[in-house]
Image: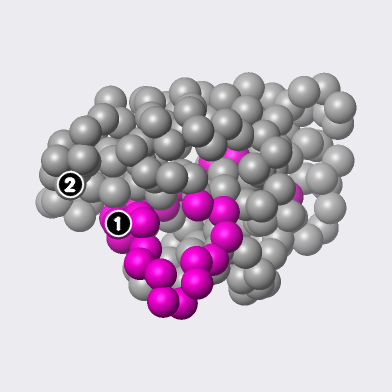
Amino acid sequence: MNVPDQLERPVLYVVVCATPRARVIGELVELAAERGWAPCVVATPEAMKFVDSEVLGELTGYPVRHKYKNPDEPDVLPSPDAILVCPASFNTINKWAAGISDTLALGLITEAIGMGIPLVAAPAVNSAQAAHPAFERNIDQLRGAGVKVLYGPGVWEPAAPRSGGAPFAWELALDALDEFRAASAG
């Protein structure tokens, strides 16, 4: 994607967490670009073990960010028009709902709630994690704050632990973003 083309598209931050699904996040980035977004990838520090930041940088035209910049450095990413947290780990969902922002990724998504930036989250947890009482409570809390969480019966349900995870249709997340974009245009 070339830079002038990117500047005409709405900017989508794809916040990637440390889950096995993160290994194929390039698929989501390509699909987002095909749908008219200018994707930028922000990874949690642990997700950096799962992603190929060089390939993602080539796909997006922007470096993968995973830590805060120094205060006097310019930001290398444009401001987001929407944020997709996908895959969203158990850790990120729970910290986000608690208002913890100890990483760049969490700082961006906790702040985005207050800024009114459209947020979609696609959890990638196993059934044992989903059974933890904090998880459902925090999903409800994020939904109450305006986050579109793609989780639950008929949407996405977790697989058994150590099974490699339940498949996730990237289109589900992109459709939710398209709904936000259509609502803001109408």
Main SS of the magenta part reads: loop
Q: Secondary structure at mark 2?
A: helix
Q: Does residue 84 appear in this view?
A: yes
Residue 77 in percent (x, y) is at 35, 55
What segment carries the magenta color? Answer: 65-90
Disc 1 residue type (three-letter):
Pro
Residue 98 in percent (x, y) is at 67, 71
Which residue: 84% across, 53% down? 132
Which residue: 48% across, 28% down? 55
70, above or below 44, in the image: below
Describe residue 33's horizontal placement relative to residue 93 as left or right: left
Q: Nearer the viewer, residue 46 or 58?
A: 58
Mark 1 residue crowding within 10 angstroms, few (<14) / some (14–19) / many (20+): some
Where residue 16 sits, quadrant-wise, is: top right
Describe residue 156's horizontal placement relative to residue 27 as left or right: right
Disc 2 residue type (three-letter):
Leu
Where residue 112 sits, quadrant-wise, is: bottom left
- Tell me the quadrant of the picture where the N terminus can be found: top left
Magenta residue check for 81: yes
Q: Does residue 168 appear in this view?
A: no
Magenta residue check for 2: no
Question: To which residue does mark 2 refer?
Answer: 7
Which residue: 35% across, 67% down? 74
- Callout 2–callout 1 Cβ contact below 8 Å: yes
Describe residue 142's horizontal placement relative to residue 19 as left or right: left
Q: Which mark is residue 78?
A: 1
Q: Nearer the viewer, residue 42 or 134?
A: 42
Mark 2 residue crowding within 10 angstroms, few (<14) / some (14–19) / many (20+): few
